[in-house]
Amino acid sequence: MQKIYNWGILGAGSIAAKFASDLKLLPNARLGAVGSKSHERAEKFAAEHGFAKSYGSYEEFAADPDIDIVYIASRHIGHYPDSLLCLNHGKAVLCEKPVAMNQGQFERMIQLAEEKDLFFMEALWTRFIPSFLRAKEIIDSGKLGRITLIESDFCFKPDYDPEGRLFNKALGGGALLDIGLYPLFLALEFGGDIEEIKAQAYLDERSVDRICNMLVRHREGILSVLYCSIVNNGRVESLIHGTEGILRMNKWWHTPTSLDLMLNDRNPVHIDFEEPGFGYQYEAEEVMRCLDQGKKQSGLFSWEHSRRLISHLDMIRKLTGISYDKPIESV
């Protein structure tokens, strides 16, 4: 008999709404509770999405004994304290990216998960979506030959809101941590260990990084050209070049999308994926699969994967001068 898991979502924003919608696609997931800092917002979210309970306090939410797994959907600066809160109350945790504001915070989160013998995973949803899995399968098969170059961008132009999370340094705003980590993640997954990084960033008058580019040399001789921006729209594509052809992950490549395989001297092959939902169900499914097997971390996106990602984000921040106030970065 399949075990049913009670999910709690901490945070009641747009990404929490999408995640809640996708949980309904999983027969072993139950919408247990939602937590917000506002009773009214929590009650409204619970009513709209069908949660059994709602809490207007993070502490009350975390203390609910019926919650098995918590999805941390709070703002970037809340990921560290909110994860610690839930781990301290014995919950398995799936924490939205970036997993923390720096590696020091991440290491403390993992330390606590180990002390409490609990499951913990960064919610890097791209790693689990069908189009990414197919891209990885193609690359691992050797069809592209030797990988030589990776190009990846994530550029979009949202409405400017100086108090919104993207443009507000006090909320952990900026392009790198919000969207730049996606191209970096791709480079790490498909290019392997990094030997050298060069990076530049444009910081606005409030020291918020709006544009960042990264030139990466991998140990296997692969180069990655990566960039992100919150001031202009871009292709939002990824191209993996090999000696035998090119694989293109099409627009909004970090979401369930389509692929184009263009091998040398062959007709291009277009690969479509018709999947339900937004694509968050796959990471949720992975969490429950791991729990069914008694695992404390995922083999697909392990603690070491998150460690590699956040350590290089820290390095890029140091190279470009991207910084945050001490209370936000404290461990």
Image (spheres, rainbow, N blue to C red):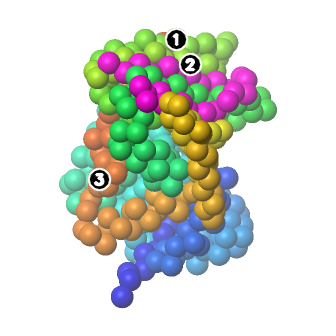
Q: What's the residue type where badge 3 is placed?
A: Gly
Q: Position of residue 165 (x, y in %)?
A: 64, 36
Q: In terms of image quadrants, where is residue 307?
A: top left
Question: Element under label 1?
Answer: strand
Q: What's the residue type where badge 1 is placed?
A: Gln
Q: Which residues are magenta?
A: 221-245
Residue 45 forms part of the magenta stretch: no
Indicate which disc, 2 or 1, sits on the residue closer to the N terminus: 1
Q: Residues within 10 Å of mark 3 (few under 14, many from 20)?
A: few
Q: Nearer the viewer, residue 300 or 41?
A: 300
Which residue in the protein does label 2 denote?
212
Quadrant the N terminus occupies: bottom left
Question: Element under label 2?
Answer: strand
Label 2–label 1 contact, CB within 8 A? yes
**Which residue is at 54% across, 17% downward?**
213
Which residue in the protein does label 1 denote?
200
**Which residue is at 26% across, 69% downward?**
293
Q: Nearer the viewer, residue 278 or 110?
A: 278
Question: Element under label 3?
Answer: loop
The dot on residue 299 is 3
Report whether residue 274 is seen.
yes
Q: Nearer the viewer, mark 2 or mark 3?
A: 3
Left or right: where 292 falls relative to 167: left
Up/down of 182 relative to 198, above or below: below
Q: In terms of image quadrants, where is residue 44?
A: bottom right
